[in-house]
Image: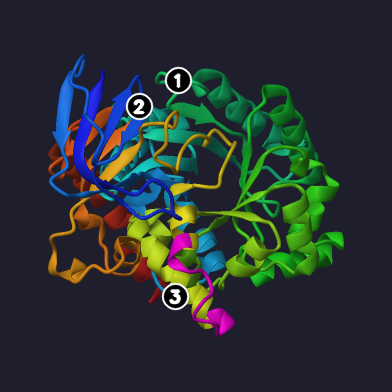
Amino acid sequence: MKTLLRNFDILTTSKSSPIKGGSLLVNGGRIVEVLETRSPVPEEGIERVIEGRGRLLIPGFVNSHTHLGMTLFRGFAEDLNLEDWLEKWIWPAEENLTPEEVYWGSALAAVESIKAGVTTVADMYFHMDQTAQALEDSGLRALISYGIIAPEMSSGGEEEVKTGLALVDDWDGAAEGRINAALSPHAPYTCGDDVLTELSKAAEEKGVPIHTHLSETRDEVDRSVENFGLSPVARVEKLGLLENEVMAAHCVHVDEKDIEILADYRVLSLHNPTSNAKLASGIAPVAKMSTEGVDVGLATDGAASNNDLGMIKEMKLAAMLSKVSNGDPESLPVEAVYRMAVAEDVDGFGLGKLGKIEEGFKADLIAVDRNSSRWIPEYDPLSNLVYSGKSADVDMVMIDGKVVMEEGKVTTIDEAEVIEKVREIATKYGRIRQSKLSNTT
């Protein structure tokens, strides 16, 4: 469908000023032409016109590390460190999950993501066929993977790797290319050397990225040094994992040598400021990594450790934490954190041709309403977006050239039905949570 988006203030890149009253031609899921205010707007062949009414048009947000199905555990376990949160609460609860429950949890996350202006997610969980189906139904773009947990190939590892590979075979390139797949060793501390080596080889053979957790807590790093004589980063380098395209979530506790390795291998570090703060894991040295040549993406992590999936909030917190941790108000300025949020600098990982409004880029776009009092006055739209904006300001979302939210209403799946289903599912986990609380008091 050939679509004209007319009379928007278009922010083409982080370095540009918005084109006032500009227009945009979209066709076949791609941006065909960006038109200045003075340019004549062609009408021939236009099947749909979307009026901007002065709204800000920007690329959609890329949530580069999520666990969509974990919306079912929003508020389930709070005020805990990562180890206790995972081992005592989340993992035992997840043993009760059914595929159908993961579908509805993922559908809820998809609705929330779209309403927050997220057009692409990189998701890792299990029962991933169900998540993939929810993503296809919702219209989101995604890089999906099954989280593999296996201490050895001989102790369940072969079956875990087989499950991860089946997801790749079934879903890589699905939904007219909107859904791609990766291989995901959950983390170096949950996967043995032989498992990591096998996954490295498999990723190379399949031509897909690796998506993993890396150096999230100080305890993880200390245990790795104690058990292997290497930091988690150095260990996965030694095992050859970094020879692939690697997306590494967190990278909170990385030293100079680790950062050098990440930069040398062009690892995409995925910054999760809210989750890392809530679990007291720490503050990733994002500004230093960027200065040293490490590419960084922005992410929310799952709703269970963040509580919401809004990327505007994540931009603001990322900037604030970087400034306070470095004692430098210029650390991670608005342009830098915005580039992370839209993946402007990312080329690869199935995320290429996103993050800019330019000819030939994917038509993954969001319109932001700036009429709220929190946007007034507006000296710099990008500054207001990062420091004043809210997810509720997003009122139109286009993915692959198709409108999936209009006037704040998701058009692809039934939000009311999704909410009702998840509320029903939550009664089961509410009982599990209450039993757990009773046994710990």
The quadrant in which the C terminus is found is bottom left
Choose the circle earlier in sequence order: 3 or 1: 1
Q: How crowded is the residue under tag 3: few (<14 C-alpha within 10 Å), some, or many (20+)?
A: some
Residue 77 visible (yes or no) = no
Circle 1 is placed at which residue position? 174
Q: Is residue 2 above or below residue 4?
A: above
- Residue for badge 3: 320
Disc 1 vs disc 2: Cβ atoms closer than 8 Å?
A: yes
Question: Are the two marked residues, 3 and 2, in contact with CB atoms closer than 8 angstroms?
Answer: no
**Which residue in the protein does label 2 denote?**
136
Q: CA distance from mark 3 to mark 2?
A: 35 Å
How many numbered discs sit on the rendered protein? 3
The picture places residue 79, in percent across and down from the top left corner, at 42, 74
Q: Residue at x 13, y 60 (%)?
A: 371
The segment highlighted magenta reads 325-335
Sequence-wise, which precedes: disc 3 or disc 2? 2
> Residue 349, image x and y in percent?
58, 36
- Name the side, left or right, on which 27 lies relative to 147: left
Q: Amino acid at mark 3?
A: Met
- Above or below, 294 against 43 in this view is below
For image coordinates 13% across by 69% down, the residue present is: 373
